[in-house]
Amino acid sequence: MSLKQFFSGFKKGMKNFGQNIALIVNSALLSIVYFIGVGFTSIISKIVRKHFLDTKLSKKATYWHDLNLKKKPIEEYYRQF
Amino acid sequence: MSTYILGISCYYHDSSAALLKDGTIVAAAEEERFTRKKHDTSFPINAVSFCLESQGITIKDVDYIGFYEKPFLKLERVLSQHLEMFPYSLKTFLGSTPSWINEKLRVPRIIRKKLCYNKDILFIEHHLAHAASAYLLSPFKKSAILTVDGVGEWTTTAYGIGKGNDIHLIKEIMFPTSLGLIYSTITAYLGFSVNNSEYKVMGLSPYGNMNRKTNIYYQKLKKVVDVKEDGSYRFDMSYFIYHYADRMPSKKLCRLLGGPVRKPGEELTQRHKDIAAALQMVLEDVMTKILNHVHKVTKQDNIVLAGGVALNSVYNGKILRNTKFKKIWIQPDAGDGGTSMGVASYIYHTLLGKKREFVLKDAYLGPSYSTKHIKSFLDKNEIKYSEFKTREELLKTTAKLIYENNVIGWFQGGMEIGPRALGARSILSNACNPEMKEILNLKVKHREKFRPFAPVVCEDDALKYFDCDNPIPEATDFMLMVYPIKKQWRTKIPSVTHVDGSGRLQTIRRGQNPLYYDLIKEFGRLSGIPIIINTSFNIRGEPIVCTPYDTYKCMMGTGIDYLVMDNFLIKRDHNSRDIWDSEKYATD
């Protein structure tokens, strides 16, 4: 095995190692965010009976929601929301 | 000085870019064609480069960049899913959050950095981009608009009206209820890939029981969807898990449909076919109700459609017969890939108020290569070829080769935008040969046996062979309408006749592609029937070919007999076989 091959393999191995570490750290941090941030908010919402998705079947005559999406001043389109 | 607007869609599926010059779409392409990753989601840097280079401009010449959705509104919906479904959504939260942090919430920064761009970036709602792609590129000055897809920000279905330069979307159905997502759920249930193989389920449906009274799965699926008289609908979400998991059907849906999710490669039984049929019928029922309601509200004779569901060509072919609309138009890339054209058009016509003069009449908006470039490629790679001396020779030789049951690769002009090959990157063969479906599958396509091949016919001949709407809608030019083949011709063109006697035809008008049109006419003079099989130039699992290199490589690894590339004829047997193993790469 040449030196070049060795370093190439070493570099590849280190990259994979780094990616795996990043995945573990990311998953750990995101799990904390999920259980504390999302979980806490979700529990509070459930207590006050707030729903974020409209999933209930109903006897109303329609499921259409008003959208009323039409041309707005151009400044509105610079926003991402 | 010209106004250039660049439209971009990315980070969901089918990334694309489109360039609009003074109101005309001058270039558009999906990123997958360059990266060779089917439905590529990445930033469309190659597609953007192509768009700019095709016009000989740089990013400094672009006046606006439009993005096809509002990322923060989409994030709101995603967070709502997690909040509603906690703690079941942990896995999807961990899976999707990094891409939100790294990409989706940094769209302006990424655009500016990757393209070295420092002017305005505008964001429009996803369904507005769909609506604009359908209406503003259509020939109509006034029309009803219906967009139906999986999901945008919150909207999954929307309708409204287009008048002059303006679009008004009036009502919507919101996530998690979605016609697109129920189709994807059953696609997943039947063992096919989501956001890719929905058209296979559509192709499978005629093998099932299409009788609403006797198909038990139709009755069962109707329990899942509550449809009101005005076409609005909502799902019983206990049958689905896509709003919090990385799978789609719930255990309850599996129980309802009488078995577990089919594994890819498992035998397709009659039950699977009946489920596909039931799904198609449910979709058609809901769509018909929606369209009748839209007609009632908008009082328009014209309808334009966009969104992934608008690619359901089986239903599209029934719209004018089942509803009160008199004219229909669908753009060739009705799914997310086409939203880049939509956002660019919306900025130019609606926001800047510039007059509408452009109508999208053909789909040849992708890269094209000069005769000199192709000759240089062939010579450099020592590929053996012959050159046609005249256009007549090209037409006569190619038509004869097709008539003699050879499989022909056809590479001419600008690549098509959208999922269908329409005569620029196509594989052509003899529709009159009853064995041709098997030959094509054996030599090239390796597709599931149930899937039909599509016919192409000149527009002026179509009504003789097909029971089309009359006049034939322009959407048929984009292979977006399935019509019955007239009974007397079904046995004459067996390779393109589906099990229910229908065909997903492409009509071609001479002005769109004179060479392709003349080839079909020439074939008609030999065979007596001017209809050819047109299938996309790729193998299963690969995007359609783009460059001469992709094309030659695809041909040499498959059983395509001849390649007609621009003015050159290449016979596969005259060249050494490539190492490309089409069987190995043939995936879902």
Image (cartoon, rainbow, N blue to C red):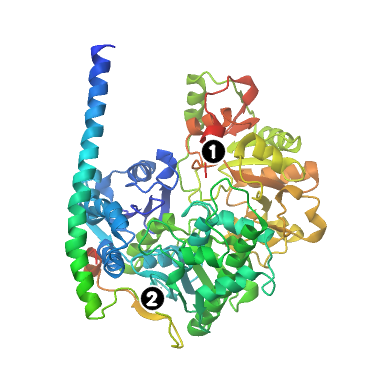
Residue B188 or residue B337, whichever sits in front? B188
Residue marked by disc 1? B586
Disc 1 crowd, CA 10 A, few/some/many (<14, 14-19, 20+): some
Task: Describe residue B296's horizontal placement relative to residue B317 as left or right.
Answer: left
Residue A55: which numbered mark, if any?
A: 2
Residue at the spot 37% in from the left edge and 59% down from the top edge: B245
Residue B571: horizontal and vertical position, in percent? 64, 25
Q: Chain of mark 2?
A: A
Residue B349 or residue B72, whichever sits in front? B72
- The answer to whether any part of residue A52 appears in the image is yes
Residue B529 against residue B181 in the figure, above or below: above
Residue at the spot 29% in from the left edge and 54% down from the top edge: B96
Residue B79: horizontal and vertical position, in percent? 26, 65
Q: For marks 2 and 1, give the CA distance.
A: 39 Å
Residue B485: which numbered mark, if any?
A: none
Residue B366 against residue B276 in the figure, above or below: above
